Image (cartoon, helix red, strand yellow):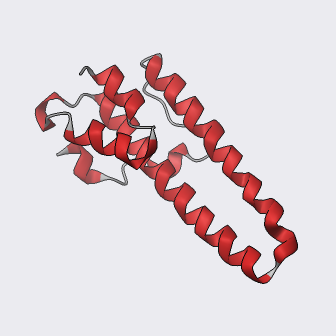
Amino acid sequence: MNQKTLSIISYITIMGWAVAYFGSKNETRGKLLIKHLEQSLGLSILSIFTGIVISFITMFVPFLAILSYLNLIFFALIILGVINAANERISNIPIVGNLFEGKFVFLRN
């Protein structure tokens, strides 16, 4: 598979990320794929962490269950990441993309 396809696949759940990561060889990973692997992994981790925190909060304060709609923001960010990957743009995801810049060093090896 080419880098564009793997970049798009990386945003489709953690399994998609694993396919994109292990489906590419270290020497053939270009800037496009590395950037989208980094962005999609960071977004997945942030989404899971936010979901756990929201679940914990709503366990004690049930009327704050409306916070669960924050997951729609993560869905929108995933869509924006897929669009960037499809257009072969090497750019950060809006709002949270800068948080993941250079955090996953193992992707560059």
8 w.r.t. 70: above or below = above
Identify the residue shown where x is 63% and y is 71%. 53
Horizontal and vertical percent position of residue 46 = 53, 57
77 w.r.t. 89: above or below = below
Q: Nearer the viewer, residue 19 or 27?
A: 19
User: Residue most toward the right?
Assistant: 63
Identify the residue shown where x is 61% and y is 63%. 50
Q: Nearer the viewer, residue 95 or 17?
A: 17
Horizontal and vertical percent position of residue 29 = 21, 31
Tell me where residue 59 sits by quadrant.
bottom right
Whether residue 21 is visible to the viewer of this picture, yes or no, is yes
Q: Is residue 49 left or right of residue 31?
A: right
Q: Is residue 108 left or right of residue 44?
A: left
Identify the residue shown where x is 58% and y is 30%. 80
Horizontal and vertical percent position of residue 26 = 14, 38
User: Residue most toward the top?
Assistant: 87
Q: Nearer the viewer, residue 34 or 74?
A: 74
Horizontal and vertical percent position of residue 67 = 77, 61
* Count of marks placed on residues: 0
Q: Nearer the viewer, residue 46 or 98?
A: 46
User: Residue most toward the bottom?
Assistant: 60
Q: Is residue 82 left or right of residue 14?
A: right
Identify the residue shown where x is 38% and y is 37%. 10
58 w.r.t. 10: above or below = below
21 w.r.t. 45: above or below = above
Quarter that holds the N terminus: top left
Whether residue 89 is visible to the viewer of this picture, yes or no, is no
